[in-house]
Image (cartoon, rainbow, N blue to C red):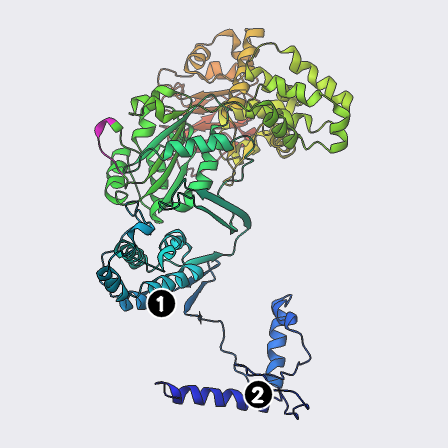
Amino acid sequence: MQVTDSVKWESAMKEDVDSLHANRIWKLTELPCGKKTLQTNGYTGLKKKQMEEKDIKQGSNLQEINSLKKQLPKEFEMTDLGAAKQILGMRISRDSKTGTLNLSQQNYIEKILCRFKMQDAKPVSTPLAIHFKLSKDLSPKTDEEHEEMSMISYASAVGSLMYAMVCTRPDIAQAVGAVSRYIAEPGKKHWEAVKWILRYLKGTLCMSLCFKQNELLLHGFVDADLGGDLGSKRSTTGYVSGILSKVPFDIQPIGIVSQLNTLKQMLEREKDGVCKIGICGLGGIGKTTLAMALYNLLSPTFEGSCFLSDIREKEKREGLSSLQEKLMKEVLKETVSIDNVREGVSLMKQRLGSRKVLLILYDVEHARHLEAFTANRRKNEEWFSAGSKIIATTRNREVLLRHGLQKEDIYFPEGLNTEDSLQLFIHRALVSDQLLAELGDLPQEIVKVAEGLPLALEVFGSHFGFLKEREEWEEALGPLKSEQHKDVHERLRISYEGLNYREKCIFLDIACFFVGVNKEYPFHMWEGCGWYPRQALEVLQHPSLVKIDKNDKFEMHDQIRDTGKMVVKEEQLTDPLTCSRPWSKDQILEVSLGNPHVHGVDFLGVSDERVKMSWKVIGAMPRLRFITGATKDAFEDEGKMVRLPGNMRWFSWSGCPYRTLTFHNSLHERLCVLHISDGHFQHLGSHSMVSE
């Protein structure tokens, strides 16, 4: 051996051969007559041991693997070096806390950068810039050009890039594929493109291939150009298939593929700046599904991404500054404290200006909902880096126009066609093939009533999903057909009418007062009323009338919530003396004046400074279960004497100005929830309680 490391190579081979002899892996034998030896680079005559290779690969659990590792040293000379740290030039790193494994070729890439004298090159942000128009016409044409290119190791550089591409850097696959076409006769422009890829690797040295220990899904992506090869005019198609981590939102993408394609085209219009589009339409038309689908599709390609949901409702409960904090945390991966919206805007400009961000603003109602998170286009400024995408959903087109969006920047979702509507309805109803054959045209009739509204289709599907006979379907279809108007509120009320008394009361309570509220306190109140809330909510959740999020807060689609409020309005129209859940300021003001219909009040929230409730009026509400005051003057001072009706289960007063509250009787002992937010109880007696 004449190579530099010949001594090391010889020593390693001798050690290997000695090990094979010691472990009796092979045995020498006479060469059969008339046969010739085979010249090989490895070892022959390997002796099979008692275990098969598949037993090693398919160890069913850690205990079996550890048992096998203990047996192997008895048969072979071997050393357990622990978990692998490197393989084929790839560095392996693990994080047990996050369940991730990373493969990195940083050292390898640094070596090829030095080899081709690109270690000090200026990094770039894309694998191949759009100004490269590569073709065979750029190949050398003169002897001088041929001689000049012969001094450049073009093929070696492309081969080095291919190894990185195959192992850990699929992000350079398209670029490497483009430059590899010209290995036979590369020109200067081709070499510039190779150096551009090296510059991209220089700027992304720390990038690695990451495997996550999560629930996995099979995904496939495909894209193509049109006549991208300037020489042959052929198109290039690329596809990626793989097992990826579970997407952020689990949605059913029925009938939205064409709409998603339209939205993606809209997002590609702005090449050099921040792209903003709006999705506008009535509740239940599918804005949420489209926004979630876009987020699933696009979020992995951005430096930071955030989906801000239910902005309209969360502003009322938490304030816009808390949503700004969430945006900063999602993008920066750190907690940032924000006291007010102006401070939040300033911080976003300072800290997110260099970030390419995907931001979804779901359910914006006012211009301030947009201006708290993104610059008005009329001001000619941006808060995020070029390439960022901002998508807002709303019912009100004027909000988007006032923010500087043009009409062509706003997408109006369409209702589902008959075929997609039928597919969504059957999917939601979980109809068996046998029942579907018996039903005949009944599903089509139901779909016709829904008129392509996805929300109605989902609710109807859940409603009919309980029915197992054709006769039951025909009977349930009658009310749907009898409703001649197109008002989806009335159609959704069909599900409401199928509830019992307890379920209806809980549904209306949530629709009018508890959307976005933690379930704990309402549960106590409903239990005190003897309504078995767990059982009732299980019924309400099945048809998607009510949902409970991961933080145990009630969720309800806007259309379903509005249906509940309309039911309450209709009660008052039917019986003027009944107004069970007044929520508007005018209704509450009427109640405070002691109008006759106060006898039917179940719920009362005093948040208007114009309203000052008299304990005498409150005492005249025998059905009152819940009352809350949001101002210090919510209740009149009558010697600090609190008079509660006997049916009261929840009393709350935010900003109570008194240290001591005295109850007129012992009825407060029936309370399930007592909340004085600006006080600290020191003593609870039979008739009084002390607060700070």
Q: Which residues are magenta?
A: 378-383
Report the quarter where the C terminus lies: top left
As rendered, which of 647 and 278 lies closer to the eye?
A: 278
Q: Is residue 655 visible?
A: no
Tell me residue 405's x, y (percent): 31, 25
Question: What residue is rendered at 54% in x and 19% in y?
Answer: 563
As rendered, which of 659 and 672 lies closer to the eye?
A: 672
Tell me residue 59's x, y (percent): 63, 68
Question: What residue is rendered at 44% in x and 15% in y?
Answer: 588
**Left or right: 526 in relation to 435:** left
The residue type indicated by label 2 comes to: Leu
As rendered, which of 177 and 610 lies closer to the eye?
A: 177
As rendered, which of 100 and 47 lies closer to the eye?
A: 47
Helix, strand or loop status at disc 2:
helix
Tell me residue 520's x, y (percent): 53, 36
Residue 272: in magenta span: no
Q: Is residue 67 visible?
A: yes
Residue 326, placed above or below residue 107:
above
Distance between the alpha carbons at the discs numbered 2 and 1:
33 Å
Question: What residue is rendered at 45% in x and 43% in y?
Answer: 223
Q: Which mark is residue 20?
A: 2
Q: Residues within 10 Å of mark 1 (few under 14, many from 20)?
A: some
Give the dominant element type of the magenta stretch: helix, strand or loop. loop
* Quarter location, residue 50: bottom right
Residue that label 1 marks: 108
Residue 245, placed above or below residue 412:
below
The residue type indicated by label 1 comes to: Tyr
Helix, strand or loop status at disc 1:
helix
